[in-house]
Image (cartoon, rainbow, N blue to C red):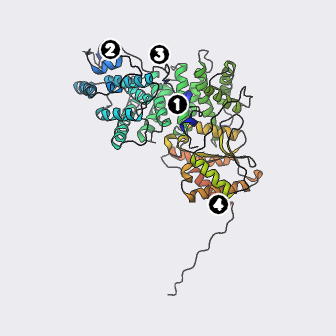
């Protein structure tokens, strides 16, 4: 669905944000203050015994320690002399500079956004990014500086794409993000003894990467490399994560959806869930986040053709569902997660969730075109099925659901790599017995492609229920196409493949005879 931001609120995104702008900062709590503070009375260079004094009048130091309120003038945070101070620190220590002052500056931007209870607006983002043209990140930075910078800037919305965006601003944003991700990948590939990473930076980094794609950041090669390099660190430290970190890791892996190879996602999630399953210290929000992450993993396995259909994650889901059901969540978002789990497990839902419904212009246009071309077809719009999220279009006489998928349903908006929320919705509908036809809006931008989509649907509704290809067979084609992505090949579009296949095999339309050329001239 090509939905507005209001519709996104019902997709389960609330649970997955470690940074709650409305909450106060509390050391040691991942959602509220993910950057552990150090004593700044003296500064050391990692790997060296020499100390250098901290300047009491340093602007970046002052910003890191001062209290920021919503009324704080943003201009005070983006003065040119602040960047001059950062550059002087970087130049002074050259290759031995570990990036800590840059990290402190990034943290001050996050604190401003947190106190304002909103990410940076477009004007603030543009003003800041222009200042960051000389904000140079190097591979010499330590984990703490890299983590603080990427997580803080992502939390504050510095990397969130804006439309329209000045070309210079867009270039600076992309260059800064690229160098940060490159440095993180480099650190991950260092020998274990050369790394200084622990569980909290791993959690913060993976959350930030998932949030980047969730915010619509463009399928860059550096981002894919960084995610692939970071996931082995999760497995290496699996026994050391606390319950809150595990909940956030499960959300991040689930949110990335098909961006993470299925076997890697399943094995990582399995090891994490085992650590958290019987922990009595879980908060209700942690249980909700964990349950959502486990459901997405279940969804991916159910949609995969060769996966073990005896889904090992369902027993974890059942345990988490019981724990959450006993507390009876009062927030709408947590109730939505519980309702989805009840649907998956075939259990009664103790309440009926409330969903907001919104139809995009593209969705409305497609509905109107479909109705005009097949007048006898009964179509229901924004219908909620079995306490699940409303579907775009339901063909009740044929047990078919049509989902018109906008960019928000794909990782990085590429119309190929589906995110966790989309995968879960499709799996839940199929588990409830519906055939699901996914149509990326890129397939209905032109009148010709719109006609092709409608023609395909016409062939599906003309086929008796017992004569249709199974849902599993259809999904097999999609999953096999997506598997090629891991091998460096670009998969063909799912709907485009099936539409052409059925137009040739099921319609029975005679092919045009080729005219013979007259060669007698």
Circle 3 is placed at which residue position?
28
- Residues tagged 3 and 4 counted as in contact (Cβ below 8 A): no
Q: Give the spatial CA distance, label 2 vs label 4.
A: 69 Å
| Direction from residue 194 to residue 29 in the image, left or right | right
On the rendered structure, is 123 left or right of 486? Answer: left
Question: 156 or 504, which is in the foreground?
Answer: 156
Question: Nearer the N terminus, badge 3 or badge 4?
Answer: 3
- Looking at marks 1 and 3 on the same chain, the residue that comes earlier in the sequence is marked by 3
Query: Which residue does the numbered mark 1 point to in the structure image?
Result: 252
Residue 137 lies, in percent from the top left, at 32, 31
- Contact flag, marks 1 and 4 (Cβ < 8 Å): no
Residue 99 x/y as whole percent: 32, 25
State the SS at label 4.
Answer: helix
Secondary structure beneath label 3? loop
Q: Residue 450, position in %: x, y?
A: 59, 56
Left or right: residue 248 versus residue 145 is right
Crowding at label 2, few (<14), some or many (≥20) Cα neighbours within 10 Å?
few
Give whichever of 409, 179 is nearer the camera: 409
* Residue that numbered label 2 is attached to: 40
Q: Which residue is mark 4?
A: 503
Q: Could you tell me how far apart the alpha carbons at marks 3 and 4 are, in whole angstroms?
A: 59 Å
- Distance (Cα) linking label 1 and label 3: 19 Å
């Amino acid at each position: 669905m090509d939905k507005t931001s209001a519709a996104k609120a019902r997709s389960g995104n609330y649970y997955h944000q470690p940074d709650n702008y409305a909450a106060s900062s509390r050391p040691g709590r991942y959602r509220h203050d993910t950057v552990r503070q150090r004593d700044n009375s003296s500064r050391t260079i990692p790997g060296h015994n020499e100390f250098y004094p901290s300047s009491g009048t340093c602007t970046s130091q002052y910003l890191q320690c001062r209290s920021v309120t919503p009324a704080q003038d943003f201009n005070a945070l983006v003065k040119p002399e602040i960047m001059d101070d950062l550059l002087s620190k970087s130049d002074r220590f050259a290759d031995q500079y570990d990036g800590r002052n840059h990290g402190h500056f990034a943290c001050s931007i996050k604190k401003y956004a947190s106190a304002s209870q909103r990410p940076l607006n477009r004007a603030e983002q543009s003003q800041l990014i222009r200042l960051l043209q000389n904000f140079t990140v190097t591979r010499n930075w330590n984990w703490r500086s890299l983590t603080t910078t990427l997580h803080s800037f992502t939390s504050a919305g510095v990397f969130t794409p804006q439309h329209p965006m000045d070309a210079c601003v867009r270039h600076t944003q992309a260059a800064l993000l690229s160098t940060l991700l490159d440095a993180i990948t480099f650190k991950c590939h260092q020998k274990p003894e050369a790394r200084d990473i622990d569980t909290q930076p791993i959690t913060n980094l993976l959350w930030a990467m998932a949030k980047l794609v969730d915010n619509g950041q463009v399928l860059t090669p550096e981002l894919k490399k960084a995610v692939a390099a970071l996931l082995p660190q999760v497995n290496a430290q699996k026994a050391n994560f606390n319950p809150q970190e595990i909940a956030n890791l499960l959300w991040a892996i689930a949110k990335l959806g098909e961006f993470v190879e299925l076997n890697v996602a399943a094995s990582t999630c399995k090891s994490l869930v085992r650590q958290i399953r019987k922990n009595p210290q879980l908060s209700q929000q942690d249980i909700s986040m964990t349950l959502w992450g486990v459901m997405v993993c279940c969804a991916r396995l159910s949609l995969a053709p060769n996966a073990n259909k005896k889904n090992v994650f369902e027993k974890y889901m059942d345990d988490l569902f019981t724990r959450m059901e006993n507390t009876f969540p009062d927030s709408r978002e947590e109730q939505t997660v519980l309702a989805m789990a009840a649907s998956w497990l075939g259990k009664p839902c103790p309440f009926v969730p409330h969903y907001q419904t919104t139809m995009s212009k593209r969705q409305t246009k497609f509905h109107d075109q479909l109705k005009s071309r097949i007048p006898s077809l009964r179509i229901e719009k924004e219908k909620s099925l079995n306490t699940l999220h409303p579907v775009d279009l339901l063909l009740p006489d044929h047990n078919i659901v049509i989902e018109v998928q906008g960019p928000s349903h794909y990782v990085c908006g590429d119309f190929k790599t589906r995110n966790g929320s989309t995968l879960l919705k499709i799996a839940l509908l199929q588990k409830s017995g519906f055939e699901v036809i996914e149509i990326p809006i890129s397939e209905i931008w032109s009148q010709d492609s719109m006609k092709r989509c409608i023609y395909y649907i016409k062939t599906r509704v003309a086929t008796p229920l017992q004569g249709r290809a199974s849902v599993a067979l259809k999904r097999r084609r999609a999953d096999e196409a997506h598997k090629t992505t891991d091998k460096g090949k670009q998969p063909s579009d799912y709907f485009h493949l099936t539409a052409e296949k059925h137009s040739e095999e099921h319609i029975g339309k005679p092919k045009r005879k080729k005219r013979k050329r007259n060669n007698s001239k």
